Image (tube, rainbow, N blue to C red):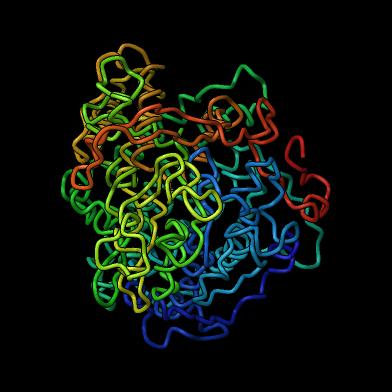
Amino acid sequence: MKNFIKNLVWGAVFIVAISLVSCSDWLDKTPDSTVSGKAAFKNFTNFQGFVETLYNCIPDFGNAYWSNSFNWGEDEIMSSGVTYHYGYKIDIGDFWGWQTNHDGWQSGWMDRNNSTATDNDRMHKSLYPLAWWGISEVNVGLANLDKMTDATVEEKNLIAGQLYFFRGWFYFQLMQYFGGLPYITSPLPNDKPITLPRLTYQQTADSAAYDFTKAVALLPIDWDNTTAGKNTLGNNQLRINKIMALGYLGKDLLWAGSPLMNWATHNYDNTYRCYNTDDCKKAAAAFGQLLNLVESGQTQYALVPFSSYSSNFYSYQKGWQLPGSTEAIFRGPVYDPNGTNWGLSKQYTPQIVGESSMGVSPTANYVNYYGMANGLPLDDPNSGFDPTHPWKGRDPRFYNDIVYDGEKFVQGAMTSDANPNDRYANLYSGGSYRDPASGSRTGYILQKFIPNTANKYDQGWGYGCSFTIHLPWMRLSDIYLMYAEAAAEGYGSVTGKDAGFSKTAVDAVNVIRDRAGVGHVANEFLSSLDGFMSELRRERAVELAYEGHRFNDLRRWLLLTEYPYIIKTSQEFIRSGNFSTTDPQDNTVSNFRQEVILTRPFAGNNKYYWLPLKVKDVNLYKGFDQNPGW
């Protein structure tokens, strides 16, 4: 933090250098917005140029390098021999590995290179340094709002609203990993020592909530409907708005009310290993306000039909466009549209039909969260799940997200030297797709974020932007599920609801299931809050699978160190009976079983609920203490 707070002081940043080439289609800067000196804050055009550097502080966590690691729960496992990604570090209990000074570039998108560059290089985007740098920039901007003399009230509100949002957002991203932090609200002088103690999680979250609340009041729903936004009409999708601010206000409050954060706020008194109902009620109110606006047609947001589900994650056509459709609420810029189709697509493709080793496999234990189309979990006695036909009758999201044994993987012609049997995913035990170093370790392949032509024969990943991968930070479906959690825990009932929104907690979950064509939450899970929460957690696991949420969900629920969330398994089976390539869902298998690949070594050890802070930061001054156990 020393390099990103102490040295970014009042007066240090008056030169505004904007580089938004990569996202110019959706975040167009206005003409003449690159300025310097006092003029930087005089009018909307110039001040917006200052603000737009903050957008380029948002990491693209799914495309931060040639291969990527951002799912750190029990959801994925690295191929054998892949030891450089942070997902592997977590698997062996090395939580220090997020830091550049601990493990160089290999620490990934959290802190690869200590860069605070606001250029358009996706590999320069690291959360930790850019968040602290962004907070400093926000405080400079807020301190200079009074210099914006040549501007309308609307323009002043737009500038202030963006600044308040970004300060809350940067802090939220930091505190969900590290806990309570000093909340800096003004530029720091360089001639005085730092004396800012760490706040509790609740105090930090309350400060972020204040900033998000200010942003909600100041920002429009859609910049296209503002006078200032007319200058970039149709290209305002990424600009911070009221819906984004409401979404993160609710998320900040729900996280603050979650068991881990409530427990930490009360000095780890075990009496508080539970939800804070007051925070949950406030979160439900924020989410309810957002959903009311959406469902009444007052916003540009809506759930996409399930037939267009992939548009949340990638676009696939000549040229390129920003994925996300109407469901993506918060996204960052696309820094390298020509490069996004390489990393993720190749790390999820077995080498036997790819051009490099498959780096990541979805774990069998996680794939088992995908229940049946009737809405029941696999282990429910009434679900209808048949282990001799394990691919039959599953949740439609299973077929969208997961490649299973026998599916057609190569769509077009194969070279003459290829084995024609490799056109189909040979994921049975010992199958050609099951090499633990270059293929699937688990019997499954992830295909949620890539089209089924992403292989070396179909060349669906061909350079030239045949498709663009860009994962959102927040989707509308997440809002429904967070509302359900907040309403249920805040009001102590599966029918809990915010007074300002018509839907109950269970209603909100069923909205998401209806979109996917899945049966509603069964009555057996509605008789108790605990029963409902088990299904809600499973619903989050499936709907938001592999989008970077699971690690933080397990942490805040105080489940990360508990069995069975500490194991990662493979699915073992053999083909039996007739094998069909035309209807793989109906294929018969035998000896269908799971085998444990690894057990994470942190069972029952509470220190793993927070990442360790940098040693140089906790030695910066007295009062900025290391996280417990580190």
Extreme residue in the top direction: 527
Residue 616 against residue 40 in the figure, above or below: above
Tell me where residue 395 sits by quadrant: top left
Q: Residue at x 63, y 60 (%)?
A: 132
Residue 82, position as x, y percentages in the image:
61, 54
Does residue 426 appear anywhere in the picture?
Answer: yes
- Number of numbered discs present? 0
Which quadrant holds the C terminus? top right
Viewer-nearest residue: 411 or 625: 411
Q: Measuring 64% from the left and 63% from the top, which residue is drawn there?
A: 112
Q: In which quarter of the image is the N terminus?
A: bottom right
In the image, what residue occupies the spot 66% across and 64% down? 105
Judge left or right: residue 245 versus residue 504: right
Across and down, in percent, residue 257 comes to 50, 31
Quadrant in which residue 458 is drawn? bottom left
Q: In this view of the protein, which residue sits in the foreground, 496 or 474?
A: 474
Q: Residue 429: x percent and y percent?
A: 44, 39
In this view, the residue in front, 228 or 388, is 388
Can the viewer see residue 482 in this picture?
no
Compared across the picture, whether 499 is left or right of 417 comes to left
Residue 145 drawn at (x, y percent): 50, 68
Q: With 141 as the anchor, is 44 left or right in this view?
A: left
At horizontal 66% and vertical 48% (from top left) the residue drawn is: 89
Q: Quick check: 294 above or below 31?
A: above
Q: Quadrant of residue 577?
A: top left
